[in-house]
Image: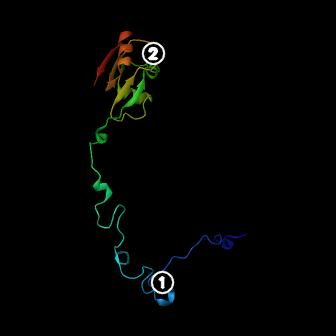
């Protein structure tokens, strides 16, 4: 078999419907649009939700409340057990040091430390947010927490 012998599978290629190209084409005259009416005109297709001029459902239904989603803060999460991996290398743990050491891939809107696991030694932590349990565990071993 050579490359010039290749051809598409039967039925996989379909010719485009060429409308409005004369009566002999079978798609002339009204160009498959039927007679008069909105759908036969140019630009006659109306968008989703259009109900023929009737007030659409989306506008009829009452709206309540609001969404605060655009202002939501998404923190990079780190547990205390993750801090133990770099606790011997650094004295002060900041979001930037965690980023450099590869503990956090992306800081997003800041860093939040959660209390899963135990902390081994006294450290100073600078973070954007911290859970109560993490704060207690760090302070119980003599560490300090600074919310930035």
In the rendering, at what x and y percent does residue 58 appear? 31, 55
In the rendering, at what x and y percent does residue 4 appear? 66, 73
Q: Quadrant of the C terminus?
A: top left
Q: Between residue 53 and residue 80, name the one nearer to us.
A: 53
Q: Between residue 40 and residue 124, name the one nearer to us.
A: 40
Q: Is residue 91 visible?
A: no
Name the residue located 36 percent from the left edge and 70 percent from the top edge. Answer: 45
Q: Taking 104 as reference, is 3 above or below it? A: below
In the rendering, at what x and y percent does residue 36 appear? 36, 81
Which of the 4 image quadrants contains residue 105?
top left
Which of the 4 image quadrants contains residue 93?
top left
The first of marks 1 and 2 along the sequence is 1
* Cα distance in 3D space between marks 1 and 2: 77 Å
Name the residue located 35 percent from the left edge and 68 percent from the top edge. Answer: 46
Q: Taking 96 as reference, is 133 above or below it? A: above
In the rendering, at what x and y percent does residue 108 appear? 36, 36
Q: Nearer the viewer, mark 1 or mark 2?
A: 1
Q: Secondary structure at mark 2?
A: loop
On residue 143, which mark appears? none
**Mark 2: few/some/many CA within 10 Å (<14, 14-19, 20+):** some
Q: Secondary structure at mark 1?
A: loop
On residue 118, which mark appears? 2
On residue 27, which mark appears? 1
Q: Is residue 133 visible?
A: yes
């Amino acid at each position: 078999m050579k490359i010039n012998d290749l051809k598409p599978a039967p039925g996989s290629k379909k010719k485009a419907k060429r409308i409005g190209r004369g009566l002999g084409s079978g798609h002339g005259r009204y160009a498959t649009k039927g007679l008069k009416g909105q759908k036969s005109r140019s630009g006659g297709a109306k968008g989703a939700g259009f109900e023929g001029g009737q007030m659409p459902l989306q506008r009829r239904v009452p709206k309540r409340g609001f969404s605060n989603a655009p202002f939501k803060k998404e923190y990079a999460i780190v547990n205390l057990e993750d801090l133990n991996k770099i606790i011997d290398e650094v004295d002060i743990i900041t979001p930037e040091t965690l980023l450099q050491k590869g503990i956090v891939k992306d800081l997003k809107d800041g860093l939040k430390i959660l209390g899963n696991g135990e902390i081994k030694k006294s450290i100073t932590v600078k973070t954007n947010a911290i859970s109560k349990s993490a704060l207690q565990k760090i302070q119980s071993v003599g560490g300090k927490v600074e919310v930035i």
